[in-house]
Image: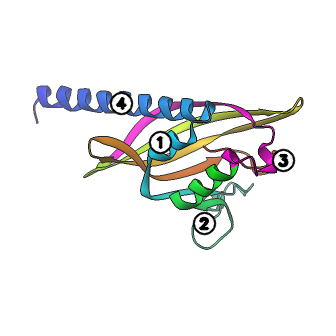
């Protein structure tokens, strides 16, 4: 590989990360503006939307910090069909925890491509989600995400999303926020 090839590869990575940052920014704006149908269109039909529970663990047991997939409890482990139903519930006014609706701000940062495997792009990022409801309800969620994005007909779709909250005790009165 030549120096020119290295520069071209680095430029391709920079351009891809910029495209993904714009994608995540547009997604955040859709969620904050409650354009949930548009948000659902960003999700791949085979989506897995998973959020394990954080635990406080000994320094020598870091592998047990988050609950394990398929064998322990999680905050979420859903597909697109369940997310679609959650959206319909919120949009229909039938969701007591979202009446009146929350105002949210989603921030996504430190976006970096970790791997590319064919059409799948693994991306790590950090997030802050602030939710405000009624006069005094404030929710703050901070954590990490690992997304697998897949290009479908030239557009990015979220195939997998793993959400890792930094807090081990959920201080929110409900968990209706999308991450």
Q: Are marks 3 and 4 in contact (CB under 8 Å)?
A: no
Q: Which quarter of the image is occupied by the C terminus?
A: top right
Question: In front: mark 3 or mark 2?
Answer: 3
Alpha carbons under labels 1 and 4: distance apart: 14 Å
Q: Judging from the image, what secondary structure is the residue with disc 2 in?
A: loop
Q: Is residue 79 visible?
A: no
> What stretch of residues is rendered in magenta?
90-115
Q: Give whichever of 77, 99 is nearer the camera.
A: 99
- N-terminal label among 1 and 4: 4
Q: Which mark is residue 80?
A: none
- N-terminal label among 3 and 2: 2
Mark 2 Cα-neighbour bin, 10 Å: few <14, some 14–19, many ≥20: few
- N-terminal label among 1 and 3: 1
Question: In front: mark 1 or mark 3?
Answer: 3
Residue 98 among magenta residues: yes
Residue position for label 2: 68
Residue position for label 3: 173
Residue position for label 4: 19
Q: Quadrant of residue 126?
A: top right
Q: Residue at x 12, y 26 (%)?
A: 4
Residue position for label 1: 124
Alpha carbons under labels 2 and 4: distance apart: 31 Å
């Amino acid at each position: 590989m030549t120096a020119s090839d290295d520069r071209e590869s680095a430029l391709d990575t920079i351009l891809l990360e910029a495209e993904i940052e714009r994608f995540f920014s547009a997604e955040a704006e859709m969620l904050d503006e409650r354009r949930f149908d548009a948000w659902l269109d960003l999700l791949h039909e085979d989506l897995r939307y998973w959020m394990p529970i954080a635990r406080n663990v000994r320094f020598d047991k870091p592998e047990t910090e988050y609950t394990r997939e398929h064998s322990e409890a999680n905050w979420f482990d859903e597909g697109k069909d369940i997310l679609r139903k959650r959206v319909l519930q919120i949009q229909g006014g039938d969701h007591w925890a979202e009446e009146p609706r929350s105002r949210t701000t989603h921030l996504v940062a430190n976006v970096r491509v970790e791997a590319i495997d064919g059409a799948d792009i693994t991306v790590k990022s950090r997030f802050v989600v602030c939710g405000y409801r009624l006069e005094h309800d404030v929710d703050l969620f901070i954590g990490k995400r690992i997304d697998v994005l897949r290009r479908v007909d030239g557009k990015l779709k979220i195939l997998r999303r793993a959400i890792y909250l930094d807090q081990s005790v959920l201080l929110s009165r409900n968990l209706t926020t999308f991450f």
